[in-house]
Amino acid sequence: MKEKTLKVLEFDKIKELLAKEATNDFSRKMAMDLLPSCDISHAAALYKELSETLDLYVKHGMPQIFGMKDISAALRRSEVGGALNAAELLDVALVLKITGNLLSYYNENNEDSLSIDKYFGMLSPNRKLENSIFEAIISEDEIADDASPNLRGIRRQILNTHEKIRGHLNNIIHSSHYQKYLQEPIITIRGGRYVVPVKAEYRAEFGGIVHDMSATGSTVFIEPGAVVAANNTLRELAAREKAEIERILAELSAKVAEMADALFVNQRVIAELDFLFAKAKLATKLKAVIPEINDKGIVNIIKGRHPLLDEKKVVPITVYLGESFKTLVITGPNTGGKTVSLKTVGLFSLMAASGLAVPAADGTQLCIFDRVFADIGDEQSIEQSLSTFSSHMTNIVSILSNITEKSLVLFDELGAGTDPTEGAALAIAILKYVKDFGACTVATTHYSELKLYALSTEGVENAACEFDVNSLKPTYRLLIGVPGKSNAFAISKRLGLPEFIIDSANKHLTEESIRFEDVVANLEKNRQEAEKEREQAQRLRLEVESLKKELEAEKAKLLRAKEKLADNAKREAKAVLENAKREAEEVINSIKEAQKLKDKKELDRALAQSKQRLIEGIKKMDKPRPQKRANVGAPPKNLLAGSSVYLLDIGQNGIVVSPPKDDGSVTVQVGIMKINSHISNLRLVQEQEVKKPTPATKGKSGSLRSDSIKSEIDLRGTTVDEALILTEKYLDDAYLASLNTVTIIHGKGTGALRQGIHNMLRRNPHVKSFRLGTFGEGESGVTIVTLKP
């Protein structure tokens, strides 16, 4: 790829984004040196590695590989016997630590065989050397006391000597004998030796070695004779400490030299893996996908977003070529998005050839072209005395002499900068030449001649950047198959250009041009109408699917309720039978016991008791079920809310919530559930007498009296699910009883129960409004509900 093409398509800015995601200088350099490849197998291998790395990154995050520095120079010096300093050894230890981190990350998170296994397999950890360096070196300027027993002993002697010297000097500065000689009662250091400040006039009387003098000459810094030997000892110990530190560093450097080759490999592999994770992080930030790649010239970008534009503002485009046509001519007004669309196609192709994910939707296809050529922007050159047209044409000549059938060619405003008639003719000839060569081409233009060329030529297609004339703003949507309008007259009119000037301009258009623009306008109008109809059809389809899911869920709910009721009935029947059996056995046993009695009176009394128990048992078995028997016959007429009915299909009694609708559907309350049933499935219960509503019911019909329903319900101690069932049943009863206001006691607690109740109240059809209690009502521990009249 030519450097000029990479720059025009802003590939360098993509590399800068990639470099920002890298954590070390090596991988940053790899990012900035990245170049597209024309080898599809190489691009496929890059994408395979990226896919595996992206999977690891999304599932397990980033491995700890931050902070690696270049240790190449240090390794080379260690190989020739040189000693490394503390900072260099710490850098080596960090490389070893990152090596261990990467292997741990890989072993903990990887289960399958991957193509990136080769990188992890090349890493050579050395925990022993890593720990030795970190234990011996605290920082670039400090070696640990425990680096060696000898160093620890030397430093202990140094500490003791320091304390001994300071002890002698403290005695001197606090002695009354020396007070008049001292400028200040302090201990200081000059030339690495402990001294005290003495007045210049007493230097002879004080005695000792003078090491320094103040700027005024009034103070001399004297080392008393009593500490000279100790100061000498301190110097000797410092020299021994330095020698021991150099020995320790040399020893560690020798161990580094032993594995220098492995460390070179580690450094390179860490950089490679960091580069891969940088690609993965960039893909995540851009919400990018790995496209399907080919070498057949097929490009199909689905909802592609230019990676350098603001994600919140950029309008995704869908563009395709390479199958039914290989030349795409994009037309439309200025600032309408033509050049962005052109650059998006070119930049995505470069990113694919570089193994980078592209910000588009799944299913995007990109071709790995052998070369990408671009003639975009103002090419005017003052230095070379070239006009815009001449400069563009110079670039185009170079492009035409280097294209192949596997190239991608991008022309921006092809043929512009010269006479429109000649420019359009040249543009058509250039497009035809590239098309005959077999290369893929995308070109932008304002020329109507190119629109006609695209309409009349096989293998060439029109595309338009949509523009809203009413708002004078582009929508930035790319529409393939439709030629675009420049909308110059409409824009000028909206901006205030007098209409007579626009009318005059219209007269200068040829009849053929007018007809063509009318055809384009009609096409655009029909397309917009068709798109609106398609969107409406899509919306209706989604609504139907949603309604279908709701109905299926309701059907399943009713089926479960029916099964539950049937199970309850079976359990009740079983309980009745078992009770009857037990009663019968008890009666039989009583009779047997009575037959054993010889006294006739006792026998008669026992038999009477047994007979009585048998009668009571029979009465229990004959006791009617809570469900009332329904009238047999035709469905009820003039059914009112509050009537008790029997549902034939589920064998249960219920209360009518509302009168039948026109289609015969009725809502019936059965226990805690509301069921929609047809009136033909209902029968009036024998004992039920439908009563007309009294004035006290405020127009509601029901079998419940207000004095039978409490004005509050206490839900404390229940779960959220239990509370919701109880509350819905209570609200139904309260509504039928014509209560205006009720109180729900849920307590304060964590607030989960209160939140669940409030969410249910928002959906309940009986609730007009609700609020939390005030002071004296229970505050946030209760909710006051106002029901609809």
Image: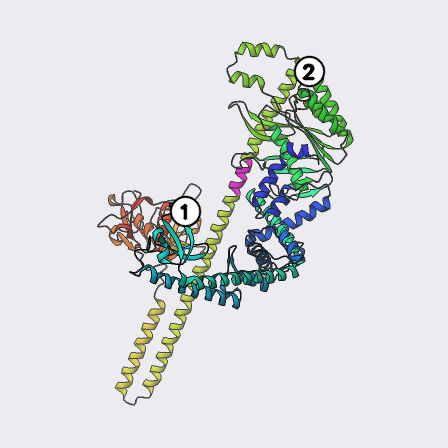
Along the line of sight, which residue is nearer the eye, 19 or 702?
19
Give the residue at the far left of this rendering.
776
The amino acid at mark 1 is Val
Name the residue beneath numbered marker 2: 419
Q: Secondary structure at mark 1?
A: strand
Per the rendering, the mark at residue 731 is none
Q: Secondary structure at mark 2?
A: loop
| Residue 661 included in the magenta stretch of the image | no
Per the rendering, the mark at residue 666 is 1
Quarter-of-image position of residue 562: bottom left
* Quadrant, the C terminus: top left
In the rendered image, residue 750, in percent from the top left (x then y), is placed at 34, 55
Mark closer to the observer (1, 2) = 2
Along the line of sight, which residue is nearer the eye, 469 or 314?
314
Give the magenta part as a residue range. 537-544
The amino acid at mark 2 is Asp
> What secondary structure characterizes most of the magenta part?
helix
Give the residue at the far front of this rendering.
204
Q: Are marks 1 and 2 in contact (CB under 8 Å)?
A: no
Name above or below for residue 420 compared with residue 582: above
In the rendered image, residue 104, in percent from the top left (x then y), is placed at 58, 60
Name above or below for residue 244 compared with residue 579: above
User: Along the horizontal axis of the image, is 129 left or right of 396?
Assistant: left
| Residue 542 included in the magenta stretch of the image | yes
Quarter-of-image position of residue 351: top right
Mark 1 vs 2, N-terminal side: 2
Along the line of sight, which residue is nearer the eye, 282 or 24?
24
